[in-house]
Amino acid sequence: MSDAASKTAATVITEAADGAKVFGYTGKILRISLTDQSTEIVPTSRYVPKYIGGRAICNRIFYDEVPVGTQAFDAENKIIFMTGPTTATGIPTGGRSVFSSIAPNSYPEQYAWSGIGGWFGAEVKFAGYDGFIIEGTADRPTYILIKDNKIVFHDACEVELWGGLVHPTQARLRELHPGRLESVVIGPAGENLMRNASVTTSNDNVAAKAGLGAVFGSKNLKAISVSGSGTVIPADIEKVLELRRDMCSPAMRPNPVVQETKHGMDGNLMEVEGGWLRGQVACSHGCNQHCCRLMIDIPSALSDDQTQNQVEKCVGIFAYGFKEDCSWLPIQSWESSQNSMPPCKMLSGEPPIPDLTDPYFEQLFKQVRGDLVNFWKPDFHKGAVMMHLCNEYGIDKWDVIVWYLTWIAMCKKEGLLDEIDFEVEPDAENEEFVRYFLDMICYRRGELGRLFGEGMARATRELGYEKYSRSIYHGRFSQALPDRRRLDLPVSLEAAWGMSYHWMGRGFESTIDKPGWLAVALMLMTSTRDMQTVAHFHGHVENHAEIAADPCHSKLLIEDVITNEDKGELKDSVSTCEWQSPDFAWDDMEAEMFACATGIALPTPELREAAVRSKLIFRAIEMRNHGRTRQMEVNEIYPSLIYPDPLGETVSLEDWNDFVDLYYEARGWDIATGWPTRATWEKYGLNDIAEDMAALGKLPR
């Protein structure tokens, strides 16, 4: 351990570069080398307040430190973890954290990030750090123990952690290190470099979308455990209390445990013999919004004599039954100032009572049944087993539920699996097959285990892309159209960059409104991963009629897209809830939270500038490290948009290109290349990146 790391870890008020006192940060970022087991301290003041925290700092560190050509499993790849200024302050919905790295789950491999809730981020700050940078590769399976200013590298095999399932690993760490302890761990999926592997902390909160569990595994890193004795002081404690009162009344009150007799929704609803217990829990430190569903004493995948508790969000419902997609409001992505209801408010106990005087009330709350898809019939026990195994193996539930098993279900019904020898009958409705399949891909057993352990995007290409990805599934039917016509859908629900459909008018959570799915597709096109788990597109319903008349040529729709993207950057940088924003009735939410935590009064327009700066650094990484261009982006996203939405609508390539033009122009990016201009880089204080792009020949005239 270096001398720098031995300094007191309980610093609660950091000092900015200009000498000003800044609350909310601890002032230190811990650099950890797995190769030689050394550490050093990087001052947080090098990055804040210009880069806010969280994802913005991750982006800047990655740009500065990770060379072009680095692959996910290379020793040169880094795992960057950052909290934000609200983490550990008690600010409601504050407290999330962000991992970033070259992502093995992206196709092709690209830089991405993944947010995580739980208490780990807060404990990192209590130990005196705003985040850490993990470098190199350990020569043997290792876990890291951080106790304030003491960092120790332990052999993960000697204490029987390597090879362990997620929950037993967490329990073993608490046994080895009694007292207050928070950990992030990987399961056997990460150890075996399964590209969908997740990183898990308390309450089954996971960093999942980027497959960063496999990056941990490639570095022989099983877990990071933290115990801190410090505190973090927000600048305005009275404001913290005010925010907590405002954000928990009247609907955000604690939810009692209740007995449920049914599970699921719409055509997936099923009676549960003996019932089940449900509670609601918060996902991160200090949060008073109980958004996550706690399922108590449900069947265990590991023993017939045991039960288990698990925490789930929306996608978990479909593990239990997936005959029908979600019911949606026809314009479910749109809100008015009178009825602005982010998902967290809808899930936290009783939702707020809608304002019936809203002139848009009828338009906003008319509900339509989701597509009939017939992927698998409701089965409570099988669903519980599926969810539990994903938790224990450390596999992203999303890809299992929305992509792996939907592919198996559709391919089986279309007769496409006859030439693939699974050794057992492939059947997404059969519990024993689900057990077999998850075990196979987690441990990469046999050739098919190796193949599907690479993720669906790579597997379908190796099997034969046209047959095993683009073949048409004939079992999807619209319930939004009077004639309930068949709507063609490819058997692989791939959207772009190795991600599956999400709020894109097709596949899972297929939003019915065309302007909504156009916006979502655009957000995915300029990213490297699914954006609807962080940005959650919402638009102003007051503009909806004008937008819907010609969405591909609507500057109003582009404004909403950019607002959602910028708010997504802010959520992951201030480190607040992934679901709460944008809230059109409270546009200054992030600014109020940032000022409350740090004492820095940064008006919303200036905070938005910081969000754009973060987006631009991400764009620079895409361009420099991954060769991103307009042509690459359009060619990646457009093929997924030729299939009909629930109303039978698609978009032409000409209109899509017009839509992209509007977006690039609004962002200050060249429409021919998709590259920001020098004026755009310099406007946001990124002159050094402008010079880098000029040297690379990536600065448009």
Image: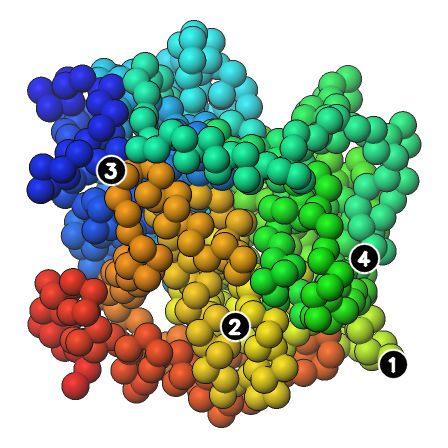
Q: Position of residue 297 (x, y in %)?
A: 75, 23
**CB within 8 Å, label 2 to label 4:** no
Q: Which residue type carries mark 4?
A: Lys
Marks 1 and 2 sit apart, C-alpha to C-alpha, by 27 Å
Q: Earlier in the sequence, mark 1 or mark 2?
A: 1
Residue 636 image-quadrant placement: bottom left
187 displayed left or right of 615: right
Q: Which residue type carries mark 2?
A: Ala
Seen at 54% across and 57% down, the residue is 585
For the C terminus, the quadrant is bottom left
Q: Earlier in the sequence, mark 3 or mark 2?
A: 3
512 displayed left or right of 134: right
Task: Label 4: state its secondary structure.
Answer: strand
Q: Earlier in the sequence, mark 3 or mark 4?
A: 3
Seen at 10% across and 63% down, the residue is 688
Marks 3 and 4 sit apart, C-alpha to C-alpha, by 44 Å
Q: Disc 4 marks which residue?
A: 323
Q: Earlier in the sequence, mark 3 or mark 1?
A: 3
What color scheme is it? Answer: rainbow
Q: Position of residue 106 (x, y in %)?
A: 42, 57
Residue 667 image-quadrant placement: bottom left
100 or 684: nearer the eye?
684
Seen at 79% across and 28% down, the residue is 258
Asked if residue 127 shows in the view, the reply is: yes
628 or 259: nearer the eye?
259
Q: Around disc 1, counting alpha carbons within 10 Å, would you say few (fewer than 14), some (14 to 19), or many (20 or more)?
A: few
Q: Position of residue 77 (x, y in %)?
A: 26, 46
Q: Around disc 2, counting alpha carbons within 10 Å, would you say few (fewer than 14), some (14 to 19), or many (20 or more)?
A: many
Q: Disc 3 marks which residue?
A: 133
Seen at 41% across and 35% down, the residue is 239
Q: Disc 2 marks which residue?
A: 519
